[in-house]
Amino acid sequence: MIWVVGVCGISPPIYVGLIVYPSLSLTLLRSFVEHRAARDASARTTAVEAHSAWALLFLNNNLHIAHHARPSLPWYDLPGLWRQLRPAVMDDPELVIRDGYGAIFRRYLLRPANTVEHPQLSRWPQ
């Protein structure tokens, strides 16, 4: 903040309102549906097929199933891996969101995505 205010001359409210909050919102939007609690480990990640601008912004991490399949793969190789994995998961709408981040926004703006209880809590059937 000393550098932002003192050197750059940006006021703290402007910095928080126009840089910090939007940046955090974008980060949370991306991770919002990509990780979730599920008994089956293969259902814990989702791929969001998004416009190339969103994919670049998130360094293709929107292809989260591919990222989890090969976490050490460079971000620029994830689309190629996703093209290989895609046919196996395309029939499950919970694993692939085809309509991008706009669909996520429309779907979850006014309702919760899931419960906060983890599926391995004792209330879940074993």
Image (cartoon, rainbow, N blue to C red):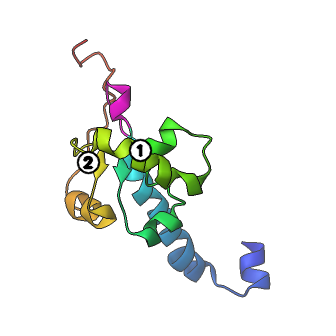
> Mark 2: few, some, or many residues within 10 Å (few <14, many ≥20)?
few
Q: Is residue 58 above or below residue 85?
A: below
> Mark 1: few, some, or many residues within 10 Å (few <14, many ≥20)?
few
Q: Where is residue 4? Give x, y as percent.
A: 72, 78
Q: Where is residue 50? Give x, y as percent.
A: 37, 63
- Residue occupying the point 38% across, 27% down: 41
- Residue occupying the point 37% across, 49% down: 47
Judge depth for marks 2 and 1 and give the one in front.
Answer: 1
Can residue 17 be found in the magenta stretch? no
Q: Is residue 124 above or below residue 85?
A: above
Q: Is residue 72 above or below residue 54?
A: above
Q: Where is residue 76? Give x, y as percent.
A: 58, 57
Residue farthest to the top, as pictured: 126
Return the residue nearer the eye: 89 or 5: 89
Q: Is residue 74 above or below residue 14?
A: above
Instruction: Tell me if 81 is positioned left or right of 74 in this view.
Output: left
- Residue at numbered disc 1: 84
* Secondary element type, mark 2: loop
Residue farthest to the bottom, as pictured: 9
Q: Give the extent of the magenta segment.
A: 36-44
The Cα atoms of the two marked residues, 2 and 1, are separated by 28 Å
Q: Quadrant of residue 107?
A: bottom left
Return the residue nearer the eye: 51 or 27: 51
Q: Main secondary structure of the magenta part?
A: loop
- Residue at numbered disc 2: 113
Q: Amino acid at mark 1?
A: Gln
Q: Quadrant of the C terminus?
A: top left
Q: How many marks?
A: 2
